[in-house]
Image (cartoon, coloured by chain):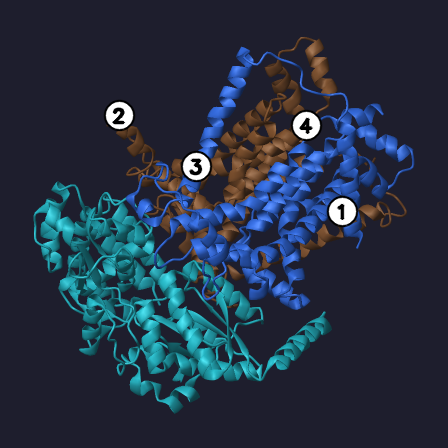
Chain colours: A brown, B blue, C cyan
């Protein structure tokens, strides 16, 4: 039903509009307002306090000539792609396994989900221990007689980002599993029955019927994982602090370090503006296709 | 007030729905040792080991004394079990001058978490519902802004929010903090609900419209009862996020309303001096217990196939 | 909304007034570990006993990176604490310039702070445009080399007495399966190590020229080149120390897995807790045994501007209390740092602390790097040195070139 050309345009859907007031205010005041504020101050030389002393593109010049920022972006790319693919796959497979009417479902679900509940300051330390070559997995395996076994992801600049990935997946894949499980539980039992009657194998039913039906759930999961990726910070701080050297730096850490450690707000705002710009370039066309093009109800 | 009303109704609807659920289903009998089961449980158990390994290290460390920890075998079971670290983490660990451990902020955390979780879920589920079924002009623009907003690192918004709260006159109050949690929970939760409600069969919605049900009636009578699993997911996300929040709790309130994560941070995050790893581990597990209990207790709400019943009925 | 806030302020006023004429004053700081908290307790005890005001403790752990945005938010949000810790130096310049910090000059002149605070550079870093805005409470120094006696015994070499001997002993330590020099992965540890090397090998004047005057010629010159060469040696010696936190690195020395560590005097607390005795189990070399001098890093308290007269009075009382001789002694013994007054006696100090006191008494002090560089510059240095110490493919020459760039950019 097209939404235009109604005489009572403003009052049409009035309840929905009233219910959406908090969302509209948040979007406009906090996100548009806050972002605009951040962008404006990214053109200033604000240090500890935000001050309107404009310096043009100086902050951006410095940002792009800093090797730490470039390395951060590379890391984010590798980490992001791996995290996205693996989270979705692991999350879905675990959810599908749990959906087999198994015993102890609640126990297994809680086991996969619990890392999400624990502060990463400390769990990061535990992963740091486990991956430490001197007293973690490497030393245990060597102790068992395999002397040449090498596993020191956190202390090898070439693979450190994968060490962080191991812990990142551990922490967040449980939540993705939960979302997938909720999605699977929303699928009509009749569909399974119909597929069974038609003799379609289970894996085909998942791949060609269930997953397409779960498209909205996958999108939710996708956005959730992506926001986690872009904002990844605690994980790195707790495990490597960006090291060895600056091999595991990430953009969000660059932003925080600039703002609060270096007390250079302008630089932090410039970095976060660049991050936001990248997000907008990806999200807005997608959002247009996803929400703008067609309507399901009306 | 409307929001509290919504919550009560949600609760009742949830109960009704879960009762309706206990109907005709049940596990089909299977041989325990079929190849399928061996594969299924084998996989789950192997994966569970990966997930449990850090927890094992934490628990074992939390019951060791410091000298034993210094010896450095993190996987070794404790030679001598002590619960001292747990007692210390809960009741006597010092935060500056206040030596009453995590217990100090526990009730503050409860007082912060409950209203924040309820309010943010109530608002976001309504947003999602409106976006899925009652779309008005411009709604998707606001929604897109929200989604983009979800990618902004929290700390970047710290100073603008201080200004907003100061201008509203609620800086340093519990109201302000609840508002902040609601704002930052909104993007993901709205998306979660919107996408879930979108997958509700359209016929159902149309039938209700034909019967003369309006915005609120359809929300409470049809959507809520059908969406238990997603409400559980929303609750999991919010309870965890808000319970574990440290930054907002400490920036937007005052010392007498600090949540227990401030104490947790103070226990585990001391930069100088001796790190008491056992107390750190115990404190982390204790703080994580509340979300863990919520996860476990919400298990029964992961129900299946309500949509099917509703369509047929 | 305005009236709501007015109401709120009014009610807090009434609340405060109803209790007593004595004020409650909220003090924020990031001292939360055992010894630190015990030291703060000395301040609180003395303050409450001597003045009758109440100290409300607002501890936030995690160091400046965690605590600073919280403190700044509180101050700019119009809801400041009564007093707050900062590392003195250039961190607070802007808050002072924005008029958010209270001017303590009157009190300082009345009590004659300039007469007894030693070295006077401490007070200088509290001074902006001739006005005093903070109370320095202690001195921490960076320039210490901590050595494990047992590690050298195991390696069959004598415990070194200076840097060159230490470098010479490194192969023997390696052969005995020890890490010669322990170094944690946190960036500040790497740049700290380099700065200590600079003071020991090139002398404090060079450091002041580079960081204080931002003299790029000196930074590019042969003296700094020599320091970079030494840093290359140090880098070689640190290979294999797979730890993050500074105290984990210290622990490598305590457990005799590493020969030594370059770290500030706060490392001493770790040795004490582990039951080690200075001179017997471990050796401390100020200035790496090359150049006995200590920097005057340290902590200071600032007092945000408030319009509550009772809090104002309590602020002055607290500032005054913190500098009293007995309070200084009690606080610094617990904190493991040196007092800011030259006229107090530290009977209970241990060997290493005594060495520090002697050096201080001889006046062999230098400004802290924090007092010369902005945090922005320090952070760039951290990034450079943590990369240098972890990536052996970066040569000393390349690193020096980048070092000069940072100095040239700094303000």
**N-term-proximal mark, 2 vs 4:** 2
Q: Are marks 1 and 3 in contact (CB under 8 Å)?
A: no
Question: Within the image, what quadrant is residue A106 found in?
Answer: top right
Image quarter where the N terminus of chain C lies is: bottom right
- Number of residues whose C-alpha sits closer than 10 Å to that of mark 2, classed few (under 14), some (14–19) or many (20 or more): few
- The numbered disc on residue B56 is 3
Q: Is residue C201 visible?
A: no
Q: What distance separates the C-alpha of mark 4 from that of mark 1?
A: 23 Å
Question: What's the residue at 63%, 36% (across, down)?
Answer: A220
Both on one chain, marks 1 and 3?
yes
Both on one chain, marks 2 and 4?
yes
- The numbered disc on residue A146 is 2
Q: What distance separates the C-alpha of mark 2 from that of mark 4?
A: 45 Å
Question: Within the image, what quadrant is residue C212 found in?
Answer: bottom left
Q: Which residue is mark 4?
A: A185
Both on one chain, marks 2 and 1?
no
Q: Nearer the viewer, residue C207 or B121?
A: B121
**N-term-proximal mark, 1 vs 3:** 1
Q: Are marks 4 and 1 in contact (CB under 8 Å)?
A: no
- Number of residues whose C-alpha sits closer than 10 Å to that of mark 1, classed few (under 14), some (14–19) or many (20 or more): some
For marks 2 and 3, give the one nearer the viewer.
Answer: 3
Q: Are marks 2 and 1 in contact (CB under 8 Å)?
A: no
Question: Within the image, what quadrant is residue C225 found in?
Answer: bottom left
- Number of residues whose C-alpha sits closer than 10 Å to that of mark 4, classed few (under 14), some (14–19) or many (20 or more): many
- Dot 1: element: helix
Q: Is residue B213 left or right of residue B256?
A: right
Q: Nearer the viewer, residue C313 or C354?
A: C354
Figure check: B283 above or below C62: above
Q: Which residue is mark 1?
A: B7
């Amino acid at each position: 039903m097209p939404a235009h050309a109604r005489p009572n345009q403003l009052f049409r859907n009035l309840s929905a509009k009233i219910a959406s007031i908090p969302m509209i205010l948040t979007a406009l005041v906090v996100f548009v307002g806050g972002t605009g504020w951040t962008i404006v101050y990214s053109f200033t030389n604000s240090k500890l306090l935000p001050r309107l002393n404009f310096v043009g593109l100086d902050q951006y010049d410095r940002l792009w000539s800093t090797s730490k920022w470039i390395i951060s972006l590379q890391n984010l790319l590798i980490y992001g792609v791996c995290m996205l693919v693996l989270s979705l796959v692991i999350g879905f497979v675990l959810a599908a396994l749990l959906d087999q009417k198994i015993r102890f479902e609640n126990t297994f679900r809680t086991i996969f989900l619990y890392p999400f509940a624990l502060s990463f300051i400390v769990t990061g330390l535990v992963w740091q221990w486990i991956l430490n070559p001197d007293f973690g997995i490497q030393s245990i395996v060597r102790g068992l007689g395999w002397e040449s076994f090498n596993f020191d992801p956190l202390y090898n600049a070439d693979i450190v980002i994968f060490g962080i990935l191991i812990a990142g997946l551990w922490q967040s894949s449980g939540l993705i599993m939960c979302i997938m499980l909720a999605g699977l539980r929303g699928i009509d039992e009749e569909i399974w029955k119909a597929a069974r009657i038609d003799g379609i194998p289970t894996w085909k039913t998942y791949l060609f019927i269930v997953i397409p039906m779960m498209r909205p759930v996958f999108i939710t999961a996708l956005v959730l994982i992506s926001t986690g990726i872009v904002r990844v910070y605690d994980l790195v701080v707790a495990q490597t602090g960006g090291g060895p050297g600056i091999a595991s730096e990430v953009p969000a850490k660059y932003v925080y370090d600039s703002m609060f450690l270096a007390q250079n707000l302008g630089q932090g705002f410039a970095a976060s503006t660049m991050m936001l710009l990248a997000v907008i370039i990806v999200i807005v066309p997608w959002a247009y296709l996803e929400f703008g093009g067609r309507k399901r109800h009306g | 007030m409307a929001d509290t009303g919504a919550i009560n109704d949600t609760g009742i609807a949830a109960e009704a729905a879960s009762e309706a659920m206990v109907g005709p289903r049940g596990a089909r009998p299977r041989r325990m040792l079929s190849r399928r089961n061996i594969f299924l449980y084998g996989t789950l158990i192997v994966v569970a080991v990966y997930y449990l390994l850090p927890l094992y290290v934490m628990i074992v460390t939390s019951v060791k004394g410091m000298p034993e920890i210094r010896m450095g075998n993190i996987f070794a079971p404790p030679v001598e079990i002590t619960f001292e670290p747990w007692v210390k983490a809960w009741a006597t660990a010092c935060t500056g001058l206040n030596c009453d451990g995590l217990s100090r902020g526990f009730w503050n955390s409860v007082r912060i978490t409950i209203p924040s979780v309820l309010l943010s879920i109530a608002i976001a589920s309504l947003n999602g519902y409106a976006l899925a079924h009652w779309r008005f002009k411009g709604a998707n623009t606001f929604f897109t802004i929200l989604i983009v907003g979800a990618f902004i690192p929290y700390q970047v918004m710290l100073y603008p929010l201080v200004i907003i709260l100061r201008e509203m006159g609620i800086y340093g109050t519990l109201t302000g903090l609840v508002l902040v949690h609601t704002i930052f929970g909104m993007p993901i939760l709205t998306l979660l609900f919107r996408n879930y409600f979108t997958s509700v069969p359209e016929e159902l919605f149309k039938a209700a419209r034909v019967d003369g049900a309006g915005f609120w009636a359809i929300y409470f009578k049809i959507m809520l009862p059908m969406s238990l699993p997603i409400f559980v997911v929303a609750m999991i996300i919010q309870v965890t996020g808000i319970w574990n929040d440290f930054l907002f709790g400490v920036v937007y309130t005052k010392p007498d309303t600090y949540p227990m994560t401030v104490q947790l941070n103070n226990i585990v995050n001391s930069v100088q001096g001796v790190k008491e790893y056992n107390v750190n581990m115990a404190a982390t597990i204790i703080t994580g217990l509340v979300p863990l209990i919520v996860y476990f207790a919400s298990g029964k709400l992961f129900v299946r196939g309500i949509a099917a019943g509703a369509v047929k009925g | 909304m305005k009236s709501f806030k007015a109401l709120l302020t009014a009610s807090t006023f009434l609340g405060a007034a109803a209790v007593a004429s004595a004020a409650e004053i909220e003090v924020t700081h990031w001292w939360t570990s055992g010894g630190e908290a015990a030291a703060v307790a000395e301040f609180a005890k003395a303050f409450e006993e001597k003045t009758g005001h109440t100290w409300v403790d607002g501890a936030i752990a995690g160091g400046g990176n965690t605590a600073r945005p919280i403190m700044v938010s509180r101050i700019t949000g119009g809801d400041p604490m009564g007093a707050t810790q900062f590392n003195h130096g250039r961190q607070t310049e802007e808050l002072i310039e924005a008029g958010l910090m209270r001017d303590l000059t009157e009190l300082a002149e009345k009590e004659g702070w300039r007469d007894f605070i030693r070295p006077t550079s401490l007070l200088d870093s509290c001074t902006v445009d001739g006005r005093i805005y903070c109370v320095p409470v202690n001195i921490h120094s960076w320039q210490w080399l901590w050595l494990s006696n047992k590690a050298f015994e195991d390696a069959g070499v004598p415990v070194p007495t200076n840097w060159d001997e230490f470098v010479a002993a490194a192969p023997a330590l390696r052969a005995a399966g020890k890490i010669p020099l322990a170094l944690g992965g946190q960036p500040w540890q790497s740049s700290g190590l380099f700065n200590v090397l600079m003071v020991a090998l090139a002398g404090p004047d060079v450091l002041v020229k580079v960081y204080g005057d931002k003299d790029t010629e000196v930074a590019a010159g042969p003296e700094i080149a020599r320091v970079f060469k030494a840093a290359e040696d140090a880098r070689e010696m640190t290979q294999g120390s797979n730890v993050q936190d500074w105290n984990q690195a210290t622990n490598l020395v305590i457990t005799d897995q590493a020969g030594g560590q370059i770290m500030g005097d706060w490392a001493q607390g770790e040795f004490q807790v582990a039951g080690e005795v200075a001179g017997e189990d471990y050796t401390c070399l100020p200035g790496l045994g090359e150049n006995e001098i200590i920097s005057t890093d340290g902590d200071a308290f600032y007092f945000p501007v408030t319009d509550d007269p009772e809090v104002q009075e309590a602020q002055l009382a607290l500032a005054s209390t913190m500098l009293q001789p007995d309070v200084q002694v009690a606080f610094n013994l617990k904190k493991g740092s040196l007092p800011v007054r030259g006229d107090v006696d530290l009977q209970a100090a241990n060997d290493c602390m005594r060495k520090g006191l002697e050096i201080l008494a001889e006046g062999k002090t230098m400004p802290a790097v924090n007092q010369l560089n902005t945090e922005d510059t320090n952070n760039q240095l951290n990034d450079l040195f943590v990369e240098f110490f972890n990536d052996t493919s970066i040569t000393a020459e390349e690193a020096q070139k980048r070092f000069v760039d940072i100095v040239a950019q700094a303000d």
